[in-house]
Image (spheres, helix red, strand yellow):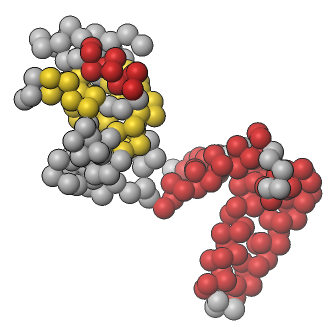
Amino acid sequence: MTLNFQKLNNNLIPAIIQDATTNKVLMLGFMNEEAYEKTKQERKVTFYSRTKERLWTKGEESGNFLNVVSMAVDCDDDTLLIKVNPVGPVCHKGTDTCWGEENTSDDIQFLKTLQDFIDKRKEEMPEGSYTTKLFTKGVRTITQKVGEEAIETVIGAMANDDENFLYEGADLLYHLIVLLTHKGYRIEDLARELMSRHK
């Protein structure tokens, strides 16, 4: 990764900080080359403070560190995007972000997390895992489970049993993601199909 620290007069580059889980933009800071190197080595975001005129590791006083997950440079080599796992609120005013937003993920984002988890299960196939058992038994067993959960979801809906309807619907969705994974697809493939129809 090559960065152009000379593009701006003060030898600083902007660093956009984004939550790796929620994808919310948390703050913007500036780094000189020394701050960048320290961030790479320690895996905690360090900025160059223009007011203090020194390196400043976010959280050095509050404990609200920004633990680095990944770093990417933009097309002009003069801006960083750093994905982090934040410890506590990010803004010095006590808010989750410097824009006063709550740093929470949308519930729908959990489907991607679940898909990633199921992908990992298929890759590692740990013993004792229900998901491993499904993959081992193959497409016939998985499709049978999808069918069973679909029927139970319908029964819950027809009986006006909302608690059971949601419970069985969640089971249906889980088994459908397992089936997608077994067939070499992901939940995003269904999302793309729906988006293409929506147009």
Q: Quadrant of residue 4?
A: top left
Q: Nearer the viewer, residue 195 or 85?
A: 85
Whether residue 121 sits left or right of residue 160 in the image: it is right
For this orientation, the residue located farthest to the left is 51
Q: Is residue 27 visible?
A: no
Whether residue 1 sits left or right of residue 195 in the image: it is left
58 vs 167: above or below: above
Q: Nearer the viewer, residue 154 or 19?
A: 19
Q: Quadrant of residue 49?
A: top left
- The image shows residue 168 at horizontal and vertical percentages of 70, 75
42 vs 95: above or below: above
Q: Quadrant of the N terminus?
A: top left
- The image shows residue 104 at horizontal and vertical percentages of 38, 57
Q: Nearer the viewer, residue 161 or 48?
A: 48
104 vs 154: above or below: above
Q: How many marks?
A: 0
Tell me the residue at 19%/17% (across/down).
Answer: 12
Tell me the residue at 21%/42% (across/down).
Answer: 61
Tell me the residue at 42%/49% (across/down).
Answer: 22
Q: Nearer the viewer, residue 186 or 20?
A: 20
Q: Quadrant of residue 28?
A: top left
Tell me the residue at 74%/85% (across/down).
Answer: 155
